Structures are given as structure tokens and as C-alpha cells.
Image: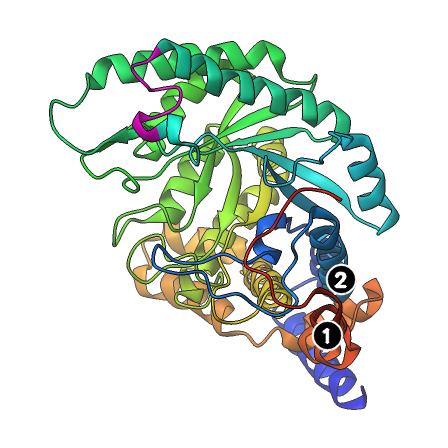
Amino acid sequence: MAHHQAAYEILVEQLTERGVDVETVKAALKRQHIETPSWGYANSGTRFKAFAWPGAATTTQQKLDDAAMVHKMTGIARTVAVHIPWDKPADEDYTAMRQYAEAQGIAIGAVNPNVFQDDEYKLGSLGNPDPAIQERALDHLLECCDIMRKVNSDILSLWFADGTNYAGQDSLRMRKRRFERGLEAIKPQLPAGSRMLIEYKFFEPTFYSTDIPDWGTAYAWALKLGDAAQVLVDLGHHAQGVNIEQIVAFLLDEDKLGGFHFNNRKYADDDLIVGSTNPYELFLIYNELATAEMSDDPALSAAARNVAYMIDQAHNIEGKLAPMILSVLNCQEAYAKALLTPRAELAALQMEGEVLLAHKLLTDAFRTDVRPLLAQVREELGAPTDPIAAYNASGYEAKIRNERGLAATSGGFQ
């Protein structure tokens, strides 16, 4: 503790000399919110195998217990996203699910429908050429709107596996129109004040065409749908070399950036721990978000503060809770570094065409060791200064291994 305090005081002195208002930065860090996914606490795997983990959650109640533990360790993960029907209660008592979450000190966040795992969806859901299957998918999406009301959620998070594998398999134009009809039918059924977030993915599981292949398609549909729809950016859903922070800046300026699914990838949609492969990219994304948050433009600042930050990862070989904690910490670190960027000085250098100095100023913020600052923030939030060490020492991992054992499947709320 003394070492942490001494390092913090040295960092405060350095930051103050750089003109940083440390208390303002700390206040922003305390407001940070990272949502964790219920499915991240259960067994999941690659296309080839799911490696069962001792103690992995098998019911939604266990997932909520685990999410509450992550929040206890980090102080900034107070909501958990649910996936339907993976988290569907046997008695469909979603009020009980919400109340159980609240009793654990957390809340239900985004509701994620599932229109990709059933055999009927082999040729798609809303984009399917069969009107009966389109209707089946729409019924489930509307069911999730009703679930949102019961769990007090204000986000419907939409990802579709729809697409084609072969040229000529279906009409690309007609698939577009089917989707537009389906999304338009959802809009009036959303709870008041809520929004649907449209996720995109440039390929997989279909390989010739994907019905929502890029942010431009999602953005075009969000424009048509109005205030009820925004774009969801999954960090793994881009081709190699795509400048994600530029997409973020554009969508922020249009007030169409609804949220993120945080993860990381080396090749495609690898679903690795966020910040593990490319922490500089994560920092640059957060820099755009922090710049917008602190903008003098009220509309831009409001748009940035309305962004939903959600994790979507598959922890296949590294456990469940500790990787989730690390994911939250990596987001916290990237945000802290972004908050330290001297924006007035950077803007002046940009206007003067000082290319190298502007770049160096930004990368210097990235290289700042913010760990003492984050330890202090966690202490003031009532969370452990070293969450991973605290979790390992808590006995929770041994407890859930003994109580839950080894199971390959997971079910709904019980």
C-alpha cells in the first residue's frame, strides 16, 4: 500500500507539471462503466472444440454471481448483458432474474436475441427467403423487446449471422429489403427511451456475402430508422488494417455510435482479451471517445457519454473470471491514458501542421504508466488496488470449482 501511495504521489506531481487536472481525470475514471456478458462466464469454444473449465457457470444465476464478483473486483462493471434463449428462465420469470441481479449489486444490461443457432436459420433469419422463417425471427426479436421491459434494459443488441455462401444462392437486393422491413417492424415495439444497436461483420459464418457486412450498411439502416437505432462496433469484425478509430470518430460525429463489443484479434474474429494484441489501437479508440466527451460541443459530448461499452469475448483456455477482470482493467487503462492527452496543445500542433510533434504528443500519453493512478481510483471506489491478485486470493475460484464441478453446457436462469 505504501509503495502504491508513493508511486501515485510521484505520478500526480508529474501530471500536474504537465497541466493535467488529476481530480478531473479521477472523476471521469470513476464514472467509467464496462458491461460484461453473461455468456463470457460459461463454457465457449472455437469452431473445433469447447474446452470445459472447472467452475464455469452453467445457469444464469451463476453467471450473475460471477458478474457481481467481477464488479466487486473492479468497481466499474455494474451491468451484465444477457443472451436469449441462453439465459431464458424455465418459468420465464424475468422479473425474478432482474431482482436476483439487483440483490447481487448489479443490473441487467443489453438484451441479445439469438436468431442464428436453430436449424431453421440455415439460410438466414430476417434475410431468409422463406417468409415463415422471417416471421419466426421477428417474433423472437419482439419477444426480446418485451423482455427488455421486464429486466429494465434500454438496449437491444442485434447481431445476425445472415448471408450467403455462393453467388446466385439468393438475391442480394431482396435480402437487403427483407432486413429493412424486419428492422422497421422492431422499432415501434422497443420500450420507451431505448434503442437498438446494429452490429456488423464483414464475413463469417457465411463466406460469399454477409447481409450486414460493414459499418456503412449498419449506419445507412440506422439513419433510416431514426433515433431508435445506432451502430454497434465489434473490434473483431473488421478486415486486417481497417482504421477502427476513424470509424468511431465518424459515427460519433453523426451521433450514430451506439456501443462497442470489446475484444481483440490477430487475424479475424478471434475474440481475444481486449487490449491483449493491440493495446495502442484500443488507446487510439478511447482517445477519440475521450476527445468527444470533453468537447465544447454539447451535442458531441452527449453522444460520447451515451455510448455503451460491452465486452464480448470467448475465454477458451484461460479461465473465465480472471480474464474478464483483466479485460475490464485493460479498458480502464486505455481510457486513463486517453484522458491524459493534452488536447489543447495537440489541437494547436495539428493546426500548425506539426506532424511529428503532434504524433509524439499523443504517443507520449500512451506510454504514461497510469497503474498508480488506477490503483488510487480503485481504492477510492472501494475496490482492490490489484484486482487480479485480490481475486486469486479471494478463494472464489476454488469455491465455484468445488460447487459447480466440470460441465460442458449451460442453461437458463434457475
- The extreme bottom residue here reads 3
Give the secondary structure at mark 2. Answer: helix
Note whether residue 397 is visible: yes
User: How far apart in space, not on screen, are marks 1 and 2 (Cα)?
Assistant: 9 Å
> Residue 152: where, in percent of width, then height?
76, 30
> Residue 268: where, in percent of width, then height?
30, 54
**Which residue corresponds to mark 2?**
69
Question: For the residue marked with disc 2, what is the amino acid?
Answer: Met
Of 39 and 15, nearer the camera is 39
User: Which residues lie in the magenta part?
Assistant: 122-130
Chosen colour scheme:
rainbow
Task: Say whether marks 1 and 2 touch (CB < 8 Å).
Answer: yes
Note whether residue 224 is visible: no
In the depicted structure, whether residue 103 falls above or below residue 74: above
Q: Which mark is residue 391?
A: 1
Q: Quadrant of the N terminus?
A: bottom right
Of 305 and 297, nearer the camera is 305
Q: Is residue 153 magenta?
A: no
**N-terminal label among 1 and 2:** 2
Q: Quadrant of the C terminus?
A: top right
Of 407 and 217, nearer the camera is 407
Of 140 and 335, nearer the camera is 140
Q: Main secondary structure of the magenta part?
A: loop
* Drawn side of residue 219 relative to residue 24, left or right: left
